[in-house]
Amino acid sequence: MDAIRLGWPVSNAWLLPTLERGPILVDTGHPSTWRGLRAGLRRCGLRASDLRAVLLTHRHSDHAGNAWRFARRGIPVYAHRADADILAGRQAAIRLRVRPGITGGFAVVENRWPARRLQVRPIEDGDQLFGLTVRWVPGHTVGSIFLIHPGSGTVLSGDTLLNAVPPLTLKTRLCLPHAPFCDDHGCALRSLRAFASSGVVIRRLLPGHGPPAEGPLASALIGLLDHS
């Protein structure tokens, strides 16, 4: 599966140009990165309106912040039902705890300026979209998901599994979700344990923060969980 990293360094958006009915965008970056995201699409010969769909790994503004820009162009935006309800305003979001330092600053931004309200097409655990399998991994947010491409062993992991050290994500390393940014960190770890024990092969990780990681990564994930 081809994948092109767009939108970083704030967070990753992944362009999947050759999937079924592609091109598909996974995550949309923070609103502050819109110009860079659009420029990245242009370098790939695409306009924002050329996308077939946008899939969100979760609702946080550094991943869903530009989703409304695609939706207003008539492009369907998908998210797990639990986060879709929050994005649509039908359910209140869990507010992040404001702590001292940089982590607290990020929490203030997320609490005060969440992703813009929009209608999202809800998806569920086990759904198949554009050749990807949806795996619900709640905890980072109530609707966090993995998107799995079984043929290549590729996992798009959002912020439930990172390849960068939070909160600044400037240093590359496989990392578990950052507790201060989670709705329920214990739930996130349980979701990851269930995923790691399911026998899914991870040959390549496309995370929400950090560069791609090459596998096999299942054993590395189990090692992280055993020391958490």
Image (cartoon, rainbow, N blue to C red):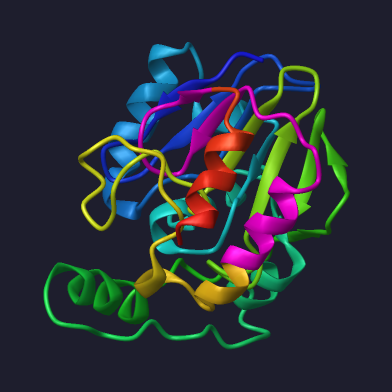
| Residue in the picture at 67% in, 54% down | 145
Residue 101 position within the rendered picture, expressed as x and y whole percent measured from the top left: 11, 74
On screen, residue 104 above or below 12: below
| Residue in the picture at 25% in, 58% down | 167
Q: Magenta stretch containing residue 202, yes or no?
A: yes
Residue 29 position within the rendered picture, expressed as x and y whole percent measured from the top left: 40, 47
Q: Magenta stretch containing residue 30, yes or no?
A: no
Q: Which residues are magenta?
A: 189-214
Q: Nearer the viewer, residue 122 or 171?
A: 171
Residue 102 falls left or right of residue 69: left
Q: Nearer the viewer, residue 161 or 120?
A: 161
Image quadrant of residue 156?
top right
Quarter of the image with the C terminus in it: bottom left
Q: Nearer the viewer, residue 123 or 163?
A: 163
Q: Nearer the viewer, residue 39 or 168?
A: 168
Residue 205 falls left or right of residue 7: right
| Residue in the picture at 40% in, 29% down | 6
Residue 81 position within the rendered picture, expressed as x and y whole percent measured from the top left: 76, 67
Count of residue discs: 0
